Image (tube, helix red, strand yellow):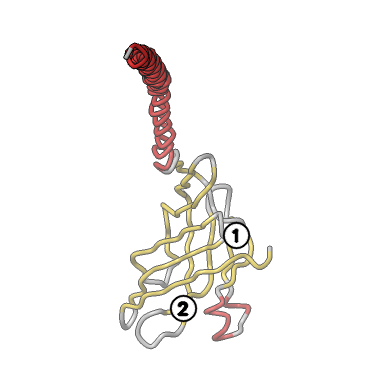
Amino acid sequence: MKLLKKITILLCFLSLIAFVSCSAEDKSGVKEKDNADGTEITGGGKSGNSGTGGTSGTGEGSGTGGTSETGGGSGTGGGTETIEEGNFPPPAGTYRDDNVWNVWKDENDDTKVSKLDENTTRIKGRSKITSGNGGGQAFGFDISKWKKTIKDGKNIKSEAVDIVVETGYNFTDISIVYYYDSSTLEITFKSKSSSVDDCLFKGTKISE
């Protein structure tokens, strides 16, 4: 009986020790987990905060201020254009319109640009009639004033302003323009003879 009592007491003692040991392990595990969780959360918060510091990086959006470069679009306004009036005739020499030449093959039909005096230029030649039944129309003009267009410091064109038609011709709507970039002389007018014909000369210089 005494032996049974001793065994019972021993078992109770061992059970108590086991219970205390398990309780200590549980507390230790909970504390460790809390610490780990706390570290991850606060650590994540800090990294997240420093990450939001990256929002200052959104200051790159201010870089869109580079759209001011599109202000260069204002530069596409075509630059500076000026007009001068004076003595700005085409270079003197012989000009040929292929449409005239291909029909008659006559050098006498080529257009001559020459100076009559210091201020007057004579242009004499033959044009192609572009209306009706076609054909050719001779012409002669004396020009004493020209209007030159300059853009960004570059000569663009020179237009005849004061035009005197050679005696014997009845012309209206006269336009005489020299284009510097293509070295082209273009003359248009209406000839009133038996009918009203549209006439055109458009050629480049072939010789002095």
> What x and y, as percent, mark residue 65?
39, 28
Circle 2 crowding by C-alpha within 10 Å: few under 14, some 14–19, many from 20:
many
Residue furthest toward the front? 1
> What x and y, as percent, mark residue 103?
54, 86
Q: Mark 2 points at which residue?
A: 128
Q: Is mark 1 on a helix, strand or loop?
A: strand
| Quadrant where the image shows the N terminus | top left
Q: Distance between the residues labelled 1 and 2?
A: 21 Å
> What x and y, as percent, mark residue 128?
46, 78
User: Is 158 positioned to the left or the right of 21 in the image?
Assistant: right
Q: Which residue is drawn at 50% across and 50% down?
A: 156
Q: In this view, does 149 lie above or below 7?
A: below
Q: Name the residue under label 1.
A: 114
Q: Can residue 159 be seen in this view?
A: yes
Depth check, front residue: 109 or 17: 17
Depth check, front residue: 148 or 15: 15
Amino acid type of the residue that numbered disc 1 sits on in the rendered structure: Ser
Amino acid type of the residue that numbered disc 2 sits on in the rendered structure: Lys
Q: Residue at x 51, y 75 (%)?
A: 126
> What x and y, as percent, mark residue 142?
48, 59
Q: In this view, does 125 lie above or below 45?
A: below
Q: Is residue 53 visible?
A: no
Q: Which mark is residue 43?
A: none
Q: Which of marks 1 and 2 is nearer the N terminus?
A: 1
